Image (cartoon, rainbow, N blue to C red):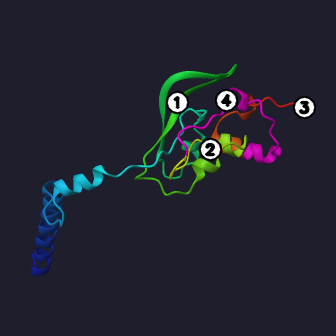
Amino acid sequence: MDQSLKNLAKLVILGAYKNIERILLGTGTYTSREMREEILSGVKLPKTILEDLCIGCGGCANACPTGCIQMEKIEPVKLTENYVKDSIPVMDLTKCIYCLYCHDFCPVFSIFNEISPIHPRDVGEEYVEIDLSKLFEKPVDIPESQLKKIASILSINLRKLMKRGK
């Protein structure tokens, strides 16, 4: 084995050891583990989902390009005669790239023109009063082509959610 290959092997082994030591033992850092934990304990993540306003369609999770939104099962809530909400989104903000697709493709916003229940930065007020059962009765003024595009992204049958007076 020539000397350059031995040096490379030595470098890889030492580098791996240093990184493992750094990760597991916290060596080579400027702040102590206690200080880092204290700093991070003061971090307050923004409220990303208004659970009461969410209709649980999963459109945000389907539109998310990074998969940072997962649907979490909840106790079923009957919203209309033929629609039951049985899950709500949960965001992993470490994966979020803030593209706002979750917000833009949320049917509460994109179809019914109400405040979106999801936003990766902050949904604002803790309490928003909207009666979801009345929301589905709201007239929708969106061209059929746009409605089909939104429906394909959201993977739900939007016609079931809306009463359309023809």
Residue positioned 23% across, 52% down in the render: 37
Circles 1 and 4, Cβ within 8 Å, touching? The answer is no
Task: Tell me the SS state at disc 2.
Answer: loop
Residue positioned 43% across, 53% down in the render: 95
Residue positioned 80% across, 47% down in the render: 145
Residue 59, numbered label? none
Q: Which residue is mark 3?
A: 166
Q: Is residue 25 magenta?
A: no
**Eye-nearest disc, 3 or 4:** 4
Q: What whole-number distance in Å separates the C-alpha atoms at marks 3 and 1?
A: 31 Å
Q: Which residue is mark 4?
A: 131
Residue type at the position of mark 4: Asp
Residue 116, numbered label? 2
**Eye-nearest disc, 1 or 4:** 4
Residue type at the position of mark 3: Lys
Q: Label 4 neighbourhood size at 10 Å, few (<14), some (14-19), many (20+)?
A: few
Residue 29 horizontal/vertical position (percent): 17, 65
Question: Which image quadrant is residue 79 in?
Answer: top right
The numbered mark, 3 or 2, whose residue comes first in the sequence reads 2
